Image (cartoon, coloured by chain):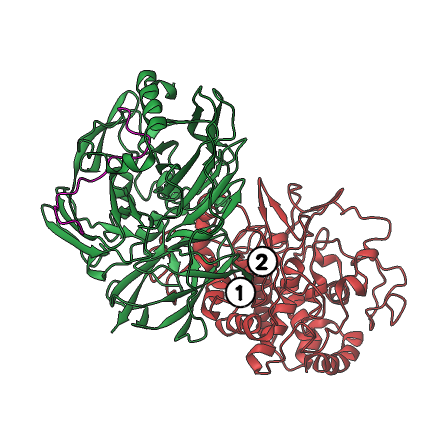
Chain colours: A green, B red
């Protein structure tokens, strides 16, 4: 029984706390202990936050260690994993716009790794790309400053050449929250961080990683590796308490290697207020939210149910596969978490402003280059990744329009490092509103155009398919921005 | 212009056909029978005649071109179609028919033995000795594309069947047919005019280099349009635009899998626009899916060697690339040139074909030793 993993007294205690405490108070609460035995109930508000060691108000200084660990991820068996600070997911980097962030990273893994700060607009040397591996036993300080306007939900994960899928599958992933001083969502809205991940285990609890030339390995390569165990913040089917009338803000990170979530909360609509690069200009009401791997979304969940009732957030079938390797059970809906209404009288719903912020448009009248990126199975423009080759040479201070074409019959999520871009259109249909994105899913045989401005940070950047098996195979290219 | 060339050729050769048997004609044309047979063999290989008439493109096959009594495939509605015995056996094979009957079969679709053995000069029933109530070959035989081959190519194919293939005694039951013997299937509206519409049609760019025009002839004559749309008629509104239906030939059921012929027009999003001519060459020569194979020159047929992918992803059957790969390099390049430069792009999104997780690799592993073809004469062949 998955329900048994969240013990009832703990739930009631937490529910009481959440109702009583304003959302802001939780954020400033003292850091939770760093080492939490995996499998024990954690705060459903999200994984613990990395404690800030700095006394300087404008600096966040944290320590992050990647190391082998033995954790209980699925009931009844311990798994040999890799973990950041002994936790899966890794602790959350919770920071503010304007903060100078110093991450003291230590690699205690037996293999080289990096920490890629997915979506952050930071210098190339801090990007954690395959160009800057940290050897076993090595250390690296990642130092960057979060620019105004960058508030949003991001995540971090390893990005070593050919090894990303393996290391993420072993447990290395965590979330980043960047907060704005002028966040328009009312303080009465409780916040949750939901880090979605899926994995597969053998009977002994070991992470199931088949040989690449085995039939299962071939299917994993084709589809991207999917697991049959779906985790929310490292837990299976956790419960989130909610009070009727309340509104919760869910920051959702798709940290899966390949799975695309089609999220539905029966009986409820989802009001999406943000995506990869932070808030939208205007909220959008949805009955379902499709979140590709690497993408994030911020949604408001309005507690329109009755006290004492329950609703299950589930991911519905999404056909992203080539017909040859489409899983037999792909049409199954899978439950992710239970939303449990507390037995209390409804509260007054907070009012959500119709305009959240201004998202400036990138000027498309002066475009330095228009480029086409043709995605086929495992390749971009017919080529495999070569770290010694520069595929795209751009110049600092210029704007480019990229046309991403998916030539083949499965979805490929396209991720650009270092820069947030704006989608112009998909298959010729203009985007309904401006949004900052760093990952865009290209459904099978579809095209999207994006505009990106290389406003700062020269250096070498990656762009790639975020299906980790494809990325590791070499479905990646190098963008070099010269000053 | 091809159409007028064909007509000139036809005007020249037809009087000879009336008067003399084929072997005499080819001598009159100044060609050696041996060379004609070799040319016929090449055409039989690259047009995939063996794919139906021997269930394999491999002249080593003991029953090469002897037809099949296997009823598992080739079902059109209630009719099971059995490819005929084309070997020169006089009891059960094409040895029963005259060269002229065989010529009329491929040029006009007229079933040998079911129509008068006379010279036919018109594709229109009731005109120029074309029977008023023609009895046509069964559906499935792509004569409406093959008929656009020049006379000497058809004669070479007949010469090969007559003199280069071992006779095999194998009786194939008659194919059932509807009461009109498929006449309603073979109207000009459905299969296009003969001779073929002049290049360029409304579907074509008019790019005029010789390679493109050559490629167009090859595309027409190799029956690409029978599955990819438009039959043998480049003026068809469906010409090479790919599947538009979930019924054959818009979709084929291959076991539990569906194959949907691709859009071959150079549309950037739904067609071949983003593939290079080299990728199209590799698709036709090696059967490798262009979107999933690197755009490189392939110099080997062994997976993992000479740029041949270690885990090849093949085109879905029944794409007859095991036959098309026998085309000479320049012909394959011409086909790619026509598809890329001679056709106008048309947006028609075709759902993916289905297949086993290995993308048919285990099916096609046994094909590696079938190219190049065994030297003539192979097991199913004989010297003239």
Left or right: A78 as drawn, with respect to B109: left
Q: Which residues are magenta?
A: A40-58
Q: What residue did someone put label 2 on? A: B262
Left or right: A303 as drawn, with respect to B55: left
* Residue under the image location 63 percent in, 60 percent down: B228
Left or right: A206 as drawn, with respect to B6: left
Q: What residue did someone put label 1 on? A: B272
- Observer-nearest residue: B11 or B20? B11
Q: Position of residue B281 (x, y in %)?
A: 48, 67
SS at mark 2?
Answer: loop
- Observer-nearest residue: A101 or B18? A101
Q: Considering only order in the chain, which callout, 2 or 1, is on the residue closer to the N terminus? A: 2
Q: Are marks 1 and 2 in contact (CB under 8 Å)?
A: yes
Question: Is residue A41 highlighted in magenta?
Answer: yes
- Observer-nearest residue: A483 or B259? A483
Residue A6 visible in image: no
Quarter of the picture containing the C terminus of chain A is: bottom left
**Number of marks:** 2
* Residue under the image location 20 percent in, 29 percent down: A36
Residue A178: assigned label: none
Crowd class of label 1 (few under 14; some 14 to 19; many from 20; radius 10 Å):
many
Question: Is residue A360 highlighted in magenta?
Answer: no
Q: Position of residue B307 (x, y in %)?
A: 35, 62
* Residue under the image location 56 percent in, 57 percent down: B320
SS at mark 1?
Answer: loop
Location of residue B79 (image quadrant): top right
């Amino acid at each position: 029984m998955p329900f048994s993993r969240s013990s009832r007294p703990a739930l009631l205690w937490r529910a009481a706390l959440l109702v009583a405490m304003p959302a802001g108070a939780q954020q400033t609460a003292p850091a939770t202990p760093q080492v939490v035995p995996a499998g024990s109930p954690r705060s459903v508000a999200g994984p613990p936050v990395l404690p800030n060691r700095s006394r300087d108000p404008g600096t966040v200084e944290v320590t992050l260690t990647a190391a082998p660990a033995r954790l209980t991820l699925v009931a009844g068996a311990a798994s040999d994993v890799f973990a950041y600070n002994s936790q899966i997911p890794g602790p959350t980097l919770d920071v503010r716009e304007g903060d100078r962030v110093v991450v003291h990273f230590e690699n205690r893994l037996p293999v080289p790794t990096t920490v890629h700060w997915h979506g952050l607009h930071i210098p190339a040397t801090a990007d954690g790309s395959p160009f800057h591996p940290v050897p076993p036993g090595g250390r690296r300080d990642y130092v960057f400053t979060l620019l105004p306007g960058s508030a949003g939900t991001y995540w971090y994960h390893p990005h070593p050449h050919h090894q990303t899928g393996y290391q993420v599958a072993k447990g290395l992933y965590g979330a980043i929250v960047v907060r704005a001083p002028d966040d328009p969502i009312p303080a009465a809205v409780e916040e949750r961080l939901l880090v979605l991940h899926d994995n597969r285990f053998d009977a002994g609890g070991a992470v199931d990683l088949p040989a690449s030339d085995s039939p299962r390995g071939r299917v994993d390569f084709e589809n991207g590796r999917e697991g049959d165990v779906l985790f929310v913040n490292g837990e299976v089917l956790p419960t989130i308490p909610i009070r009727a009338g309340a509104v919760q803000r869910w920051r959702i990170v798709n940290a899966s290697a390949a799975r695309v979530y089609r999220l539905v909360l029966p009986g409820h609509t989802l009001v999406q207020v943000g995506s990869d690069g932070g808030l939208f200009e205007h909220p959008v009401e949805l009955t379902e939210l499709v979140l590709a791997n690497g993408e994030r979304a911020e949604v408001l969940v309005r507690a329109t149910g009755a006290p004492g009732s329950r609703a299950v957030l589930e991911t519905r079938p999404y056909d992203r596969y080539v017909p040859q390797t489409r899983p037999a059970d792909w049409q199954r809906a899978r439950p992710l978490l239970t939303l449990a209404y507390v037995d209390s009288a409804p509260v007054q719903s907070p009012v959500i402003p119709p305009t959240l912020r201004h998202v400036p448009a990138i000027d498309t009248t002066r475009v330095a280059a228009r480029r086409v990126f043709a995605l086929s199975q495992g390749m971009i423009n017919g080529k495999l990744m070569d770290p010694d080759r520069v595929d795209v040479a751009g110049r600092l201070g210029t704007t480019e329009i990229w046309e991403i074409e998916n030539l083949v019959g499965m979805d490929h999520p396209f991720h650009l490092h270092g820069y947030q871009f704006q989608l112009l259109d998909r298959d010729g249909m203009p985007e309904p509103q401006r949004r900052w994105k760093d990952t865009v899913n290209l459904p099978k045989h579809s095209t999207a155009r994006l505009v990106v401005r290389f406003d700062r940070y020269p250096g070498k950047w990656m762009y790639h398919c975020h299906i980790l098996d494809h990325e590791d195979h070499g479905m990646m290219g190098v963008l070099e921005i010269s000053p | 212009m091809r159409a007028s060339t064909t007509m000139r050729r036809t005007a020249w050769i037809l009087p000879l056909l009336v008067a003399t048997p084929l072997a005499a004609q080819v001598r009159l044309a100044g060609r050696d029978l041996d060379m004609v047979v070799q040319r016929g063999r090449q055409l039989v290989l690259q047009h995939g005649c063996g794919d139906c008439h021997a269930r394999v493109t491999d002249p080593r096959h003991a029953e090469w071109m002897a037809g099949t009594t296997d009823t598992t495939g080739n079902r059109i509605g209630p009719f099971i179609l059995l490819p005929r015995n084309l070997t020169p056996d006089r009891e059960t094979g094409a040895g029963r028919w005259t060269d002229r009957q065989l010529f009329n079969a491929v040029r006009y679709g007229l079933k040998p033995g079911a129509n008068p053995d006379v010279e036919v000069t018109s594709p229109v029933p009731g005109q120029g000795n074309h029977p008023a109530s023609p009895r046509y070959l069964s559906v499935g035989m792509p004569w409406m594309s093959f008929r656009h081959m020049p006379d000497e190519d058809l004669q070479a194919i007949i010469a090969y069947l007559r003199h280069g293939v071992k006779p095999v005694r194998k009786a194939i039951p008659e194919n059932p047919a509807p009461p009109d013997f498929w006449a309603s299937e073979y109207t000009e509206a459905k299969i296009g005019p003969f001779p073929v519409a002049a290049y360029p049609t409304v579907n074509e760019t008019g790019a005029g280099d010789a390679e493109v025009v050559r490629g167009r002839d090859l595309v027409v004559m190799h029956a690409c349009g029978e599955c990819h749309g438009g039959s043998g008629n480049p003026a068809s509104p469906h010409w090479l635009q790919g599947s538009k239906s979930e019924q054959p030939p818009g979709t084929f059921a291959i076991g539990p899998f569906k194959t949907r012929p691709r859009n071959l027009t150079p549309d950037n999003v739904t067609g071949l626009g983003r593939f290079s001519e080299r990728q199209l060459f590799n698709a036709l020569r090696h059967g490798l899916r262009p979107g999933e194979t690197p755009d490189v020159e392939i110099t080997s047929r062994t997976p993992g060697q000479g740029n041949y992918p270690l885990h090849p992803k093949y085109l879905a059957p029944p794409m007859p690339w095991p036959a098309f790969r026998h085309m000479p390099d320049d012909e394959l390049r011409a086909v790619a040139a026509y598809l890329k430069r001679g056709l106008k792009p048309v947006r028609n999104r075709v759902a993916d074909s289905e297949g086993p997780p290995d993308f048919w690799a285990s099916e096609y592993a046994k094909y590696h030793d079938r190219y190049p073809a065994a030297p003539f004469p192979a097991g199913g062949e004989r010297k003239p």
